[in-house]
Amino acid sequence: MIREKAIRFGSSASLVGVVSEAEPVDGGERPAFLLLNAGILHHVGPARLHVALGRQLAAAGFTSLRFDFSGIGDSEPRRDTLPFDESTVVEVQEAMDHLSRTRGARQFVLFGLCSGADAAFRAAKAEPRVVGHVSIDGFAYRNFAYYLHYYGPRLLKPRSWIAFTRRQLAKAGRVVRATLGRGQNSPTAPPVFAREFAPRDEVASELSALANQGVHQFFIYTAGHERWYNHAGQFHRTFRDVDFHGRLRVDYFADADHTFPDLGHQEALITAICDWARSVWSEGLRRETGAEVGGGAVASAGVEDR
Amino acid sequence: MRTHRAFRQLAGRLTDVGFHVLRFDYFGTGDSGGTGRDASIAGWLEDISAAIGEIEDTAGVRKVSLIGLRLGATLAARAAALRSDVDRLILWNPVMSGGDYASELAVEATRFKGARGGGSNGGGLIDVGGYPLTRGLREELLGLDLLALDDLRAASVLIVASERSESYERLGQTWSGRGTETAHRFISTAVNPSDDDEFVSALMPAEVLETIVDWLVGVAR
């Protein structure tokens, strides 16, 4: 059975998480995983994804810490006014500091889904101790092939035309009501969360910088992200100008929804992540010089085939 | 999972007015050990007993109150009926019939299956959006019926409902008739932490939380 420990950490001891202790395995020291919040869901993740992933990683020899950012789950709210984009980086660093102090961890892999993916990427850019990140449904950019995949099937279906017409009529109705001062939003209506991605060129530059630092990058996209991503190969086409030095893997789960609300899909996801981690770090930590280090590297093309 | 935020806020409000509070995850859920496939109603009732023992030891108390939401409320009532140290029960939108609840979950599973996920995985297991509902658990649910609970043993009960229900009113009347001091509060709220569609919302049913705290404080005097 995997050993786990609930902890408080951080400069104010206000952050709460659970450490899954790595099982002893051959091959030397391995990085520790930090599992970041998905939206405002607490550290167990959607359908206990983070719990299952943390335990499987531990069984594979990787210590993990699933924790709550301040104000989420069991962690206290911050007492300063640091914006979320910045506080998440600080708190990831505090998590790293804790594992360094208590378990001698020197390098880390960050895991995040949705806003967690965004947080993982921000922290990876800012923190040299990060040697890898797994981002599910993070930034994505529509290209010509995206629109082909999106509109192609729809143009052939009468139902799509009816739905399109209905949406336009509904939109017109909202405009009319707003003009007449009616139809104010209900104060208890759920807020609409919108994500904005940085410009593609900016992200390409950041990806390149991480690749040059030796960071292994694993991007996973699902059918639930179809507003931004809808076919295998989209990531490679989008960032064909970036040299990942063989440290890139991209998987597209064409049948899975955004939070993997399916036992089979969740198991496949966890297997993919653990297999990737083992393949990259089965021989322990290595000094990354920016050049390809033999053994364990993952090909950057042709992997996206789910 | 979805009730975590509500219970954390409730716990904070209760500790503010002097109550010791223990929140815990049943076996096979949350941070606790095991997987959903290994979970059972009988096991969860033992978990409640273990939690009661833990807080009695830690806080040095002899009587406890149990607060449950939906199936948790039903289990709280079942657990209370087996002990003499549960003084008060707060049942928030309790599941009245385990059989009806199992049917709801089966419908929920179908909804997920239609949206790229969930459904049946074979072997009698129903995948409810990533949560396994085993055949064994379904059979145990069939045996849950709040109205059939004879001896609550708790001194006071608060039923909090976010929707008007004849079942809840009948429950309150039945238990009152058996000598248990029972209060029933209907609180209309647009926010329901059990509602799947609300799970990304940060809104909390503040009035429900206030009602629970006020009732406990009032009964404690």
Image (cartoon, coloured by chain):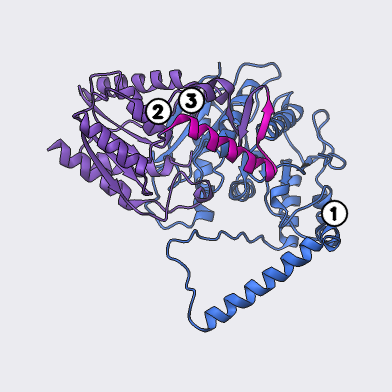
Q: Which residues are magenta?
A: B97-122
Query: Is B116 covered by the magenta stretch?
Result: yes
Chain B: drawing colour: purple
Check disc 1 and give the amino acid type.
Arg
Query: Magenta span: helix, strand or loop, mainly?
Result: helix
Mark 2 and mark 3 on one chain: yes
Residue B41 position within the rendered picture, expressed as x and y whole percent measured from the top left: 46, 22
Q: Nearer the viewer, residue B200 or A108?
A: B200
Number of numbered callouts drawn:
3
Residue denoted by label 3 = B142
Check the picture and name the quadrant holding the C terminus of chain A.
Answer: top right
Q: Nearer the viewer, mark 2 or mark 1?
A: 2
Query: Is B55 covered by the magenta stretch?
Result: no
Q: Nearer the viewer, residue B161 or A228?
A: B161
Task: Kindly identify the residue that appears in the image at 73 percent across and 44 percent down.
Answer: A219
Residue denoted by label 1 = A237
Mark 2 element type: loop
Chain A: drawing colour: blue
Question: Mark on residue B214?
Answer: none
Mark 1 and mark 3 on one chain: no
